Image (spheres, helix red, strand yellow):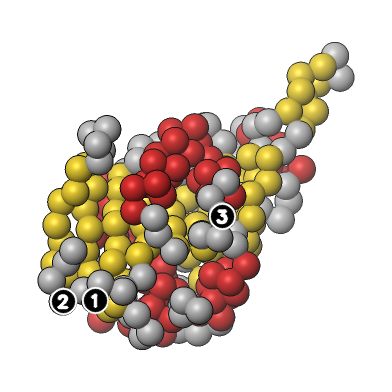
């Protein structure tokens, strides 16, 4: 247990897919220690001081893809037994968002599920929803600007926003608006504001684990077109940092009842 953490402190887990997301989350923690799962997963655990609780936070980098995410989410839940679990990372923006903005997912469409017939592809989406209480807290924090105080001072005055809308999750990196995947999302899931690769698997595992509170938070690292150019300008790191700032603001204001 991290130094200065109360034995009765609530527990949370934050999952990420790639190293830069993991590092963005890690910067918010104190007194970090390493933990090793019996099956070999290497986790870290640290202390986060929120407004209502001193949280014990387990963090893990689980890799990309919905199937991998579902497996690793289940494993982390069983190991840490948390009250809250978050997935924090980056995504491609489809609409209503600019580079560096943040979306807390209301739901995630598993858009690749369906049936191929003589009439073409018939969608049978898997839809995962964030748990009610923590999503309500995310909605409240998205209306405010205080989450930006967790960013470096020079970034706090930038015109960044956080919104609470649906996202889409598949197994493909969508790197262009002129693509079959984009056309499918735009036509069938037209309330989607961002696309990523882990949300559907994350929700599937979370829904199977009782009363745990769960939420996805994504920073916008590209707008699908010109992805390599925005990556070269550091927007993956910026988006991961902004998503982490918002996620920890939500956690800070979230009260375990």
Residue tagged 1: 6
How many other residues sit within 10 Å of disc 1, few (<14), some (14-19) or many (≥20)?
some
The location of residue 208, given as percent across then percent down, is 57, 46
Residue 128 shows up from this direction:
yes
**Cα distance, mark 3 to mark 2?**
29 Å
Compared to residue 160, the image places residue 87 above or below, namely above
**Cα distance, mark 3 to mark 1?**
25 Å
Viewer-nearest residue: 30 or 224: 30
The location of residue 32, given as percent across then percent down, is 15, 61
The location of residue 210, given as percent across then percent down, is 56, 55
**Cα distance, mark 2 to mark 1?**
6 Å
Q: Earlier in the sequence, mark 3 or mark 2?
A: 2
Viewer-nearest residue: 107 or 13: 13
Residue tagged 2: 4
Point out which mark residue 23 bears: none
Residue tagged 3: 210
The image quadrant where one finds the N terminus is bottom left
- Determine the image quadrant of residue 114: top right
The residue under the point 16% across, 66% down is 2
- Determine the image quadrant of residue 45: bottom left
Viewer-nearest residue: 133 or 230: 133
Q: Secondary structure at mark 1?
A: loop
Q: Secondary structure at mark 2?
A: loop
The residue under the point 46% across, 76% down is 256
Viewer-nearest residue: 238 or 54: 54
The location of residue 207, given as percent across then percent down, is 59, 50
How many other residues sit within 10 Å of disc 3, few (<14), some (14-19) or many (≥20)?
few
Is 31 left or right of 147, judged from the image as shown? Answer: left
């Amino acid at each position: 247990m991290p130094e200065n953490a109360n034995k009765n402190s609530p527990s949370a887990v934050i999952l990420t897919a790639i190293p830069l997301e993991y590092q963005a989350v890690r910067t918010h923690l104190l007194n970090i220690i390493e933990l090793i799962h019996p099956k070999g997963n290497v986790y870290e655990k640290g202390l986060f001081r929120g407004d209502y609780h001193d949280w014990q936070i387990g963090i893990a980098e689980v890799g990309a893809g919905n199937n991998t995410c579902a497996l690793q989410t289940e494993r982390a839940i069983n190991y840490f037994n948390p009250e809250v679990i978050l997935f924090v990372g980056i995504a491609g923006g489809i609409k209503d968002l600019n580079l560096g903005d943040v979306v807390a997912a209301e739901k995630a469409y598993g858009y690749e599920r369906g049936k191929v017939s003589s009439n073409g592809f018939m969608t049978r989406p898997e839809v995962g929803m964030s748990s009610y209480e923590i999503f309500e807290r995310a909605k409240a924090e998205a209306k405010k600007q205080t989450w930006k105080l967790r960013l470096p001072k020079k970034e706090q005055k930038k015109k960044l926003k956080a919104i609470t809308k649906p996202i889409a999750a598949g197994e493909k990196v969508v790197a262009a608006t002129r693509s079959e995947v984009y056309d499918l999302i735009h036509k069938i899931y037209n309330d989607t504001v961002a696309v990523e690769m882990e949300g559907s698997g994350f929700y599937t595992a979370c829904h199977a684990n009782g009363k745990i509170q769960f939420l996805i938070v994504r920073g916008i690292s590209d707008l699908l077109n010109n992805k390599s150019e925005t990556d070269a300008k550091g927007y993956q790191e910026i988006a991961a940092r902004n998503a982490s700032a918002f996620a920890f603001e939500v956690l800070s204001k979230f009260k375990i009842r």
